[in-house]
């Protein structure tokens, strides 16, 4: 008898809940804001500044690429030619 | 005078008769001797009679088939090497020559391997020549060069030192002007080599002291001006470097062309921050050398297949030579000063004389006809060899011009960049006020005197010129260089 009462009560409560949901769906109206002002100037952000506030280019020395100019590191060419011209 | 003429006629007759007798003896051996040593004996008779070029094929044939050399053959080969140079064993391959360890063959084989850039092998072969042998000087020079090329400077200096010492000794012992000149040439070459190693080791002052040992009348002297100029350049004495390179503009040295000297002059001006002067040298280089290179290329292209054209130029009469491009004329003059060219030319003359002597022999037979045919071929070969040598010299010179054109191009870009910087930095007005030369800018040693240059070159002053330009380098320029 006790079990029958519990099952009956549970079924009744599910039935009531389901009926409420159907009623809510029918009454919901979504509406967007028609006008809103955001004052960015008055907004404040708390915390530390990690990057510079404005964009700048630091002046630095212009890179000069050096061309290879003639160097005399050895006399191989002259020495070989001298031997060739000997005999 | 009458006696002198008679003596000469008698001497000529005696030589002719002796030559005739040895040619006859060689003929008899060729007919009657059936031994293995027949060719060696024929060669010996011919060498004895002064028919050196005729003996070459017989010596070569003998060495081709044998691997033993007795003292007489060794002496004959040595005579042939002295009289005919590298022709002596021309037909023998290196593998065959390697089996013989006598000094004359070792010298020829070593030279041949050196020219083929087989340095290790060449060094090993040249080391076979005994220290006291007369060919040891040339061997030391070549061995020193090999060590120099391998950057083993301590060994190279030691070998060049030995070469200088031996050549000095032989020069004082030599009888005859030609031999003295030959040893003097070797001595100076080895001194110059020592100085060059010093430059490569950045010991510029020591190198300059060594160059002082070369006499101004030496064949080698015009060539050392470039070396000295480089030494002064690296000592940052740019005025002296310009002074040395400008020496080539003297009328006495007009037949010497060194495109590299123009580059060095432009570089020296560049290091003094005299951009305009440097640019002038660069532009002059292109104006001066470009037409010359084109003329040479043209003459090479038209005669590339000829075996005689360039040799004929050398033999051309003065009038024909006058009509040549002066640049080509001067290049031939410069080639005539090379040892190899002169040796080959002397060989050509000796071979022709020998042929004339054989043609005069009374009894003609198959043997003498064979000698004549061989000599004809030898003369044609030496002629083609000299012709090729001149052609190669011209070709090397064109390559030099092209190589330095590239250096000049880079320098010009650098100069234009410097001039642009100067305009940006508004410092160009400095150039207007520059001081064009002063004695105060000339670096001098205690033993050097100062004379003004008044527009004319004096022979005793050549090689001692220095400019007196003030460097226009600001600190910024110095840093950027």
Image (cartoon, grey):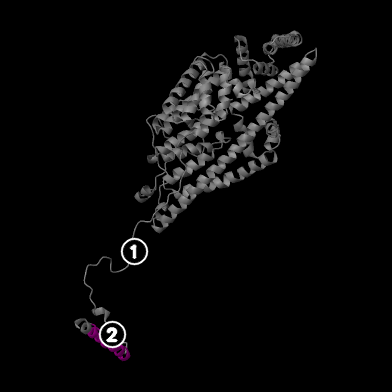
Q: Main secondary structure of the magenta part?
A: helix
Position of residue B339 measured from the top left corner of the image (x, y, whole percent): 59, 26
Q: Describe residue A19's horizontal placement relative to residue B42 as left or right.
A: left
Q: Which residue is mark 2?
A: A37
Dot 1: what SS? loop
Q: Quadrant of residue B389?
A: top right
Judging depth in this view, the residue of B469 and A4 nearest the camera is: A4
- Mark 1 in CB contact with mark 2 (< 8 angstroms): no
> Is residue B465 inside the magenta stretch?
no
> Is residue A22 inside the magenta stretch?
yes
Q: Residues within 10 Å of mark 1 (few under 14, many from 20)?
A: few
* Label disc, if present, on residue A30 of the rendered structure: none
Numbered disc 1: what chain? A
Position of residue B317 measured from the top left corner of the image (x, y, whole percent): 70, 31
- The stretch in magenta equals A7-27
- Mark 1 vs mark 2, CA separation in Å: 36 Å
Judging depth in this view, the residue of B324 and A35 nearest the camera is: A35
Q: Which residue is mark 1?
A: A57
Find the residue positioned furthest to the left. A2
Q: Quadrant of residue B20?
A: top right
Position of residue B34 measured from the top left corner of the image (x, y, whole percent): 73, 9
Numbered disc 2: what chain? A
- For the point 37% across and 47% down, which residue is it? B478
Instruction: In the rendered view, tell whether residue B21 sits above or below residue B119.
Output: above
Q: Earlier in the sequence, mark 1 or mark 2?
A: 2
């Amino acid at each position: 008898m006790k079990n029958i009462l519990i099952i009956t009560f549970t079924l009744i409560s599910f039935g009531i809940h389901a009926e409420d949901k159907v009623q809510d769906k029918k009454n919901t109206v979504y509406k967007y804001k028609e006008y809103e002002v955001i004052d960015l100037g008055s907004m404040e952000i708390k915390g530390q500044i990690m990057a510079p506030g404005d964009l700048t280019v630091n002046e630095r020395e212009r890179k000069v690429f050096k061309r290879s100019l003639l160097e005399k590191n050895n006399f191989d060419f002259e020495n070989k030619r001298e031997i060739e011209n000997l005999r | 005078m009458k006696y002198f003429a008679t003596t000469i006629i008698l001497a000529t007759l005696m030589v002719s008769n002796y030559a005739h007798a040895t040619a006859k003896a060689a003929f008899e051996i060729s007919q009657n001797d059936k031994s293995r040593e027949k060719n060696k004996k024929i060669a010996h008779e011919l060498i004895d009679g002064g028919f050196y070029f005729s003996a070459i094929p017989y010596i070569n044939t003998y060495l081709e088939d044998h691997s033993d050399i007795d003292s007489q053959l060794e002496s004959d080969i040595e005579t042939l090497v002295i009289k005919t140079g590298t022709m002596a064993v021309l037909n023998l391959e290196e593998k065959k020559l390697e089996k013989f360890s006598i000094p004359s063959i070792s010298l020829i084989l070593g030279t041949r391997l050196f020219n083929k850039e087989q340095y290790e092998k060449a060094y090993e072969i040249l080391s076979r020549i005994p220290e006291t042998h007369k060919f040891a000087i040339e061997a030391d020079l070549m061995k020193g060069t090999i060590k120099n090329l391998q950057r083993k400077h301590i060994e190279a200096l030691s070998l060049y030192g030995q070469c200088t010492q031996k050549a000095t000794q032989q020069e004082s012992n030599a009888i005859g002007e030609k031999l003295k000149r030959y040893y003097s040439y070797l001595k100076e070459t080895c001194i110059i080599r020592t100085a060059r190693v010093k430059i490569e080791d950045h010991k510029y002052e020591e190198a300059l002291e060594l160059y002082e040992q070369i006499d101004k009348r030496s064949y080698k002297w015009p060539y050392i001006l470039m070396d000295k100029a480089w030494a002064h350049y690296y000592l940052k004495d740019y005025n002296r470097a310009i002074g040395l390179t400008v020496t080539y503009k003297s009328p006495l040295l007009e037949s010497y062309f060194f495109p590299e000297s123009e580059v060095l002059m432009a570089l020296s001006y560049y290091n003094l921050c005299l951009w305009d002067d440097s640019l002038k040298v660069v532009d002059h280089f292109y104006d001066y050398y470009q037409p010359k290179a084109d003329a040479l290329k043209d003459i090479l292209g038209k005669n590339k297949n000829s075996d005689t054209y360039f040799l004929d130029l050398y033999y051309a009469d003065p009038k024909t030579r006058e009509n040549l491009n002066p640049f080509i004329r001067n290049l031939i003059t410069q080639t005539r000063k090379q040892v190899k060219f002169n040796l080959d030319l002397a060989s050509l003359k000796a071979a022709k004389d020998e042929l004339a002597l054989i043609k005069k022999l009374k009894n003609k037979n198959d043997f003498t006809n064979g000698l004549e045919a061989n000599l004809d071929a030898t003369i044609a070969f030496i002629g083609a060899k000299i012709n090729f040598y001149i052609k190669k010299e011209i070709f090397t010179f064109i390559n030099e011009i092209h190589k330095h054109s590239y250096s000049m191009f880079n320098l010009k870009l650098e100069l234009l960049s410097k001039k642009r910087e100067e305009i940006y930095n508004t410092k160009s007005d400095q150039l207007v006020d520059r001081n064009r030369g002063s004695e105060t800018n000339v670096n001098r040693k205690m033993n050097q005197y100062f004379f003004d240059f008044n527009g004319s070159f004096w022979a005793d002053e050549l090689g001692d010129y220095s400019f007196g330009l003030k460097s226009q380098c600001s600190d910024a320029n110095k840093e950027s260089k």
